[in-house]
């Protein structure tokens, strides 16, 4: 049913720590692996070994350069997957009822047997979290690993999403946002967890922890004074050399 | 957005078809017998032909019947339901004219309104999307309705209405372009809000997540051919609006009318291509592509 639940009993989701993520893409690979071998249609690749390689992924890691007003620039790695929005526009646009949000835990899922592959839900998602699989012709998206988190056959430490289990930096956290004492709720409160594109009105469940400001001593390199340019307005031999070198092709005279 | 042929054909043809049904339903022309059959056949060719084209872009058309179920929330589903009901009601009206030579006026009126609502639902599939600021504007449904009305009146030979509706649609088209060109800037979304990392001036996309292309880029970050946009806009206005108006103002002749129709359809195709190709989806912000 494409009507969104008024509220959900639990709000399962992820906290992604942009301060900690090292951009190794391990979560991308573990996600692709798990979701190709388990629930639903495989995440296909087309022309995997050719020049036009392309494939379906449910989680992708961008990298951004951020230049604050003062201090050095920072490089931020930015994993992005479905945010399991409370006002999920992808669900309400779906004509078939294939897309739905679960009342029990808030997870947004696609019933692949009902999906006609119209692609409208991918258009409705601001975050690019849905990809139509080129081979299966059905919409694929993050399931929050429903086939792991409720899977009693797995050891307890594995009953979390594959990306969270894999992250070597501990940049991904899984939990219930409806419980104010959960790990994810506490992290969000402590570190100022934020919504992506709040102006889109999707009310994402997943939260992003902003990078902490970098230490800045003001002096970047203790050897810097020794590396001051020699003779900017040189006289004598140095001045002559500077003029001659500048006059060569490629010089700046 | 990727300008898929099937979707461009669908919105253009079905718009014209339902526009025709609107004028026929209102009783602007009341053909009987064989003539009625021909009129309805043409209108259904356009409207149904367009609807069939729209299923070509579905990856699983064999499940298309499911698309009639979610009309409570989905404009795409509403469009499907409305189109079928409109076609059925107009078929009943047509049957009266063809076989009984009787005009059930009220059935026609209801069919006319349903035809208009179908076009409105089509436009709302696009106008509802917050993710595509260019489309999310009141001028989008007005423009779709305008094109349907202009095409419908042109096809059914309502010269006075056609002249007025063509001119009006030209204005609505201009309005849609003018409002659309600044829409992304005004939407409040930029790479800063998309990443939450600072102002748009501070954040720069450094490295994309993948080396090749992907579904998102192909479908929603389509940029090929935008450089011809200005010329295409002029072409679309000239062919879709200007030339048909001139041809209608000339002394009436069947050849001229046919030419006006062909020119109009070509113009609408160009306008629809631009409608998709120029539409910027906010997901492009994550790729630094806006
Ligand atoms: S992130 Fe996109 S796909 Fe996921 S719930 Fe939100 S709108 Fe839907
Ligand atoms: S692609 Fe599938 S899940 Fe998405 S809107 Fe269409 S039918 Fe629904």
Image (tube, coloured by chain):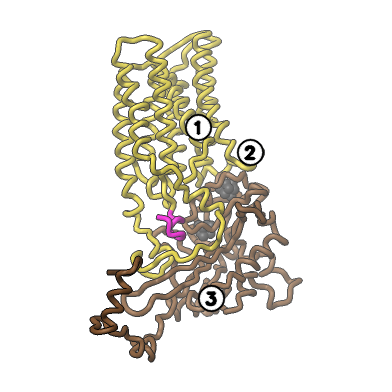
Magenta range is: B282-290
Look at 62% across and 62% down and name the residue there.
A143
Asked whether the viewer can see residue A7, the reply is no
Q: Nearer the viewer, residue B249 or B70?
A: B249
Label 2 in the same subunit as label 3: no
Quarter of image, res B30: top left
Asked whether the viewer can see residue B208, the reply is yes
Return the chain for callout 1: B
Q: Nearer the viewer, residue A252 or B177?
A: A252
Look at 61% across and 53% down and name the residue there.
A51
Q: Nearer the viewer, residue A201 or B132?
A: B132
Q: Nearer the viewer, mark 2 or mark 3?
A: 3
Q: Colour of chain A?
A: brown
Return the chain for callout 3: A
Q: Colour of chain B?
A: yellow
Residue behind mark 2: B61
């Amino acid at each position: 049913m494409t009507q969104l639940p008024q509220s959900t009993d639990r709000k399962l989701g992820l906290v992604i720590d942009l301060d900690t993520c090292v951009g190794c893409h391990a979560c991308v690979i573990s996600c692709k692996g798990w979701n190709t071998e388990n629930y639903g249609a495989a995440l296909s690749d087309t022309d995997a070994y050719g020049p036009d390689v392309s494939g379906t992924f449910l989680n992708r890691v961008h990298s951004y350069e951020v230049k604050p007003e003062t201090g050095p620039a920072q490089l931020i790695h930015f994993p992005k997957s479905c945010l399991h929005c409370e006002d999920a526009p992808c669900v309400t646009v779906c004509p078939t009822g294939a897309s739905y949000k679960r009342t029990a835990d808030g997870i947004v899922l696609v019933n692949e047997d009902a999906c006609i592959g119209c692609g409208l839900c991918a258009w409705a998602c601001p975050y690019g979290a849905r990809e139509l699989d080129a081979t299966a012709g059905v919409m694929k998206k993050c399931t929050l690993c429903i086939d792991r988190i409720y899977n009693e056959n797995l050891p307890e430490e594995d009953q979390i999403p594959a990306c969270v289990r894999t992250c070597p930096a501990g940049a991904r956290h899984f939990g219930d946002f409806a419980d104010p004492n959960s790990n994810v709720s506490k992290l969000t409160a402590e570190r100022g967890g934020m919504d992506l594109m709040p102006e889109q009105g999707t009310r994402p469940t997943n939260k992003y922890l902003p990078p902490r400001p970098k230490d800045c001593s003001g002096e970047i390199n203790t050897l810097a004074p020794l590396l001051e340019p020699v003779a900017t307005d040189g006289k004598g031999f140095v001045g002559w050399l500077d003029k001659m070198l500048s006059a060569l092709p490629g010089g700046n005279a | 957005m990727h300008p898929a042929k099937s979707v461009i054909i669908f919105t253009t043809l079905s718009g014209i078809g339902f526009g025709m049904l609107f004028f026929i339903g209102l009783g602007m022309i009341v053909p009987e017998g064989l003539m009625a059959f021909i009129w309805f056949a043409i209108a259904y060719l356009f409207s149904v032909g367009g609807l069939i084209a729209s299923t070509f872009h579905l990856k699983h058309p064999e499940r298309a019947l499911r698309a009639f179920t979610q009309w409570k929330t989905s404009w795409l589903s509403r469009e499907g339901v409305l189109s079928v009901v409109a076609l059925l009601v107009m078929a009943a009206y047509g049957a009266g004219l063809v076989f009984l030579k009787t005009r059930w006026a009220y059935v026609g009126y209801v069919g006319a309104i349903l035809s208009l609502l179908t076009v409105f639902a089509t436009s709302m599939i696009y106008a509802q999307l917050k993710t595509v600021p260019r489309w999310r504007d009141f001028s989008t449904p007005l423009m779709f309705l305008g094109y349907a009305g202009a095409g419908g009146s042109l096809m059914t030979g309502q010269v006075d209405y056609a002249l007025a509706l063509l001119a009006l649609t030209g204005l609505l088209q201009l309005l849609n372009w003018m409002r659309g060109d600044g829409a992304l800037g005004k939407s409040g979304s930029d790479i800063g809000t998309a990443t939450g990392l600072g102002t748009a001036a501070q954040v720069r996309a450094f490295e994309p997540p993948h080396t090749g292309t992907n579904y998102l880029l192909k479908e929603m970050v389509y940029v090929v051919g935008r450089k011809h946009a200005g010329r295409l806009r002029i072409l679309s206005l000239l062919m879709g609006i200007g030339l048909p108006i001139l041809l209608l103002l000339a002394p009436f002749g069947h050849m001229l009318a046919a030419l006006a129709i062909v020119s109009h359809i070509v113009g609408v195709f160009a306008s629809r291509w631009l409608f998709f190709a120029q539409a910027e989806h906010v997901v492009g912000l994550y790729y630094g592509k806006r």
